[in-house]
Image: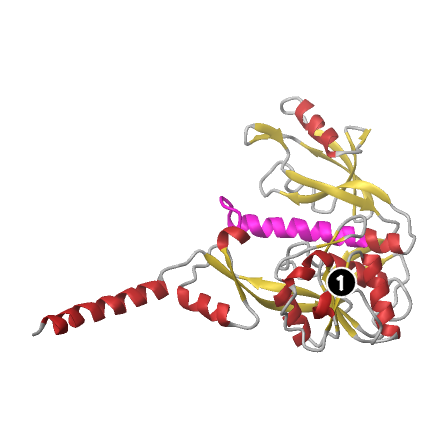
């Protein structure tokens, strides 16, 4: 056997083994792909997604679709082949895992954080919609999360509005921390709260958690609305990016006529308490999902405009959204005249 043939006999199996190993060894990347879209004006499991108690509602034609992105879980191990497939796709994207998932956390941590963001997003969206309608309401401290097996578990609940602590009006989270720290060992802290519109009193006994006296809750900005608004969305959907579409849908539900003129409008964007629309991730995948769902207009957070160049939007118009108010006016202008000049993201918005 010649030296050249011998070298080939040795090299070919090594090359094949290296190729197989390369294709199978997990890589530190995750993929984004278009996720499902949800018409927030529709029903889910036989119930309206936007549920209102105590105020007249209007159910008209048209769709306002929130969009989602399917992201591989942090514990999913992807080899080179599926990553190359996603990279070559016209609708998917590949990102380093470190750019998407924070180190030192778990999948359960990610899901819990997503649910906190969803609760805050829904309540903020309601506040923005009511403010757009000129309806007054009061601020409050809201329970966004209750840690399992903590002192508050079974005593306090997500969306409880905390009004008083130990008989004192609660105006900020620091007061609650001080009351918990001041409670005597074996003693309790008494909360006066609103739950499902009813005033209740609840006592919680603090415990030492991670070296500090705590009761195991996460707080955020809440609101005491003059009537109840609930967004009945699939609990598996987390994150803050549907805030703009929630707010527009609540506004549409509380006003006569169809905001979209019977057409299908989709979009995305985190909503702030002042109505500002913030950027989100996976904008190109959301555009693809919206186009496939039949949307004719897509609302893009202003800070995401730089990310939509080359997006596969087809005939669907991309409209820049800076605030909920501006987004509402853009949709109304488009309904009046589909060829109207609207705030756009450069050439991609035309």
Residue for point 73% across, 34% down: 173
Magenta span includes 110 = yes
Magenta span includes 62 = no
Q: Is residue 151 left or right of residue 44?
A: left
Q: Is residue 350 left or right of residue 287?
A: right
Residue for point 46% across, 71% down: 85
Residue for point 83% across, 59% down: 326
Q: Position of residue 316 (x, y in %)?
A: 72, 74
Q: Position of residue 330 (x, y in %)?
A: 83, 66
Residue for point 68% across, 28% down: 180
Q: Position of residue 268 (x, y in %)?
A: 71, 62
Q: State which region is magenta.
A: 101-126
Q: Main secondary structure of the magenta part?
A: helix
Which quadrant of the view contains residue 320?
A: bottom right
Q: Is residue 250 visible?
A: no
Which quadrant of the view contains residue 219?
A: top right
Kindly give the residue lying farthest to the left in the view shown. 1
For label 1, the residue is: 320
Q: Quadrant of the N terminus?
A: bottom left
Q: Is residue 96 left or right of residue 4?
A: right
Q: Is residue 211 left or right of residue 27?
A: right
Name above or below for residue 172 compared with residue 349: above
Name above or below for residue 77 compared with residue 337: above
């Amino acid at each position: 056997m010649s030296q050249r043939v011998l070298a080939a006999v040795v090299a070919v199996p090594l090359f094949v083994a290296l190729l197989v190993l390369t294709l199978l060894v997990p890589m530190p990347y995750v993929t984004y792909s278009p996720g499902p879209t949800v018409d927030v004006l529709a029903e889910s499991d036989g119930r309206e997604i936007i549920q209102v108690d105590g105020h007249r509602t209007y159910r008209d034609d048209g769709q306002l679709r929130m969009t989602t992105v399917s992201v591989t879980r942090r514990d999913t191990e992807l080899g080179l082949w599926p990553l190359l497939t996603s990279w070559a796709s016209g609708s998917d994207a590949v990102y380093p895992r470190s750019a998407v998932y924070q180190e030192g956390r778990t999948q359960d941590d990610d899901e819990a954080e997503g649910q906190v963001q969803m609760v805050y997003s829904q309540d903020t969206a309601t506040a923005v919609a009511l403010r757009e309608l000129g309806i007054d309401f009061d601020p409050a401290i809201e329970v966004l999360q209750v840690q399992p097996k903590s002192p508050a578990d079974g005593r306090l609940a997500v969306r409880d509005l905390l009004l008083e602590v130990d008989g004192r009006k609660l105006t900020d989270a620091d007061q609650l921390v001080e009351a918990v720290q001041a409670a005597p060992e074996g003693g309790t802290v008494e909360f006066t709260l609103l739950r499902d519109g009813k005033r209740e009193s609840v006592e919680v006994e603090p415990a030492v958690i991670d070296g500090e006296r705590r009761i195991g809750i996460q707080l955020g900005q809440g609101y005491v609305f003059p009537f109840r608004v609930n967004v009945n969305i699939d609990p598996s959907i987390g994150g803050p990016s549907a805030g703009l579409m929630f707010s527009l849908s609540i506004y549409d539900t509380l006003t006569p006529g169809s905001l979209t003129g019977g057409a299908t409008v989709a979009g995305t964007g985190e909503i702030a308490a002042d109505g500002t629309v913030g950027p989100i991730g996976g904008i190109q995948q959301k555009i693809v999902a919206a186009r496939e769902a039949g949307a004719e207009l897509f609302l893009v957070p202003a800070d995401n405009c730089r990310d939509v160049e080359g997006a596969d939007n087809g005939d669907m118009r991309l409209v820049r959204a800076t605030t909920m108010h501006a987004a509402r006016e853009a949709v109304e202008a488009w309904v009046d005249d589909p060829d109207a000049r609207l705030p756009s993201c450069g050439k991609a918005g035309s």
